[in-house]
Image (tube, helix red, strand yellow):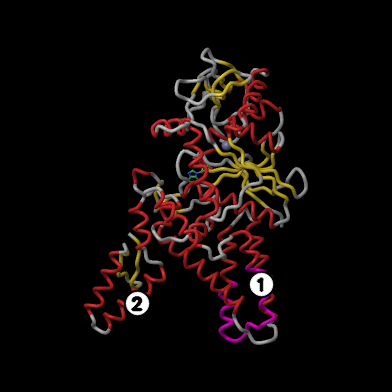
Amino acid sequence: MALQIFNTLSGRVEELKTLADKRIRMYSCGPTVYDYGHIGNFRTFVFVDLFRRFLRHSGYQLNHVMNITDVDDKIIRNSSAKGVGVREYAAKYEQAFFEDMEILSLEKPEEIARATEHIPEMASLIARLQKKDFAYKTEDGSYYFRIAKFPQYGKLSKKDMTAISDGARVDLDEYEKDNVRDFALWKSPKPGEAKWETEIGPGRPGWHIECSAMAMEYLGDTLDVHLGGEDLIFPHHENEIAQSEAATGKTFARYWMHVRFLLVEGQKMSKSLGNFYTPRDLILKGHKPSSIRYLLSSVPYQKQLNFTFDGLKQAANSVERLRNFKARLDTGRFPAGSNPEMETLAKATREKMRAALEDAMNTAQALAAVFDMVREANAAGDNGKLLRDDIPALQEALGDFDEVFAVLEDDDAQKSKQVLQWARAEGRLADAALAESNLSDAEVERLIEQRQHARKSRDFAKADAVRKQLADAGIILEDTKDGLRWKRK
Ligand code: AMP
Ligand code: ZN
């Protein structure tokens, strides 16, 4: 089979056919560096990483560009509230974003392009659009895109264009989702805002123009794949298409892939609901980076991922099982010989994982295949039926898995330590102290066992002491009909 993906543009699953054989030109929208990235952002970025890794594993040569939006309304607003310059402010969160990428084992794209370093390219794209009458200048020196002149507008988001009124404008970077209006390409200078002198006059770019200008700068007029979170379909990606295709007369991106928004405990993540988490928050609560990456990877990109603390705990167990299995293969002692069933199992698992990922990146199915292998090989091992010559084939299958999922290397402790150092340096001492008092999952389980044991032997003082120790570390015990369960506060 060949790689299939869901293409938002056509609205169906299609075979991915790149313009040049086994080379892929792709662009993914990167972060707006106005704050630390949250797990919703990283749901999308982790998916882009899985896709990259699978493409390479499938023999593609990658040319992947990701932008950094380092000037926009939010950055300007937040930096002036803090009384620091836009550049200094954005640089801090860009650095934090790169650290988070490393913490979650995200590969760096081949090209990372900052908006503020591509202002002339944006200005010249706007000049081109103006020449063709797709852009117009307003009295104050701003430029807008004339949507009425681009009849294909709406083809990605499937918006109804009948209600559009020529010349109605919006200049906010934070859009009303249903309002189709002429959008800002360039904003005239305002007091206290960053501005650039360019061939189209002074000012700063609107949000959308950077992605068109930078994608075409590095990848040419037509790209293979463009990715982002589903909130970007309208207006951001619709506008990217309009700006690029109006200028070149060519298709901008042939495939569009959008990651469904993540929910937290069944609800939209928001600061006001108190369910807003960054990867750093979770690590300071004692969760492992690999659990976060695994959980964010476990649901196919078109399906809604519901992030829960139970799920995070299960993810930790899953990673642990895989690592234990790897350790068993790497260091276990097995009788001489080979069991043909094991070789068949390894081969079938590799095929199943590939088939699952080729089927629109069905990560859930790929994980199911690897866990079937772990279960069967472990059972064979326990019955003396896993033999020395079987090991390389199983290791290879596990290696295939990790080339895409990247969770087997046990570097969680070191990464968590980095986050702890950051919390201290930022003066988040309460968070840091909490993190230090956090018990690992294994320690919690060990204490719970001690408490059960104490209760059975009627040593209630000891049982109470252990319970208090757990409570102090923020662990809540719940008696359920399936037995005792625990969670973190
Ligand atoms: P931003 O930094 O806001 O420009 O967003 C960076 C990326 O994260 C974009 O691709 C967004 O679509 C994506 N994103 C934001 N929130 C979520 C969410 N809750 N679930 C999935 N992706 C998200
Ligand atoms: Zn973009």
- The answer to which of 461 and 340 lies nearer the viewer is 461
* Boundaries of the magenta span: 373-398
Residue 407 percent location from the top left of the image:
56, 62
Residue located 45% across and 33% down the image? 74
Circle 2 SS class: helix
Please name the residue shown 64% across and 61% down the image: 403
Residue 333: image quadrant is bottom right
* Residue 375 falls in image quadrant: bottom right
- Where is residue 121 shown, x and y percent of the image? 65, 28
- Residue 393 on the magenta span: yes
| Mark 2 vs 1, N-terminal side | 1
Give SS at disc 1.
helix
> Residue at label 2?
449
Residue farthest along the top direction in this orientation: 139
* Image mark for residue 346: 1
Which label number is shown at residue 271? none
For the N terminus, the image quarter is bottom right
Query: Quick check: 139 above or below 236?
Result: above
Q: Nearer the viewer, residue 303 or 381?
A: 381
**437 w.r.t. 125: above or below:** below
Magenta span includes 310: no
Disc 2 marks which amino acid? Glu
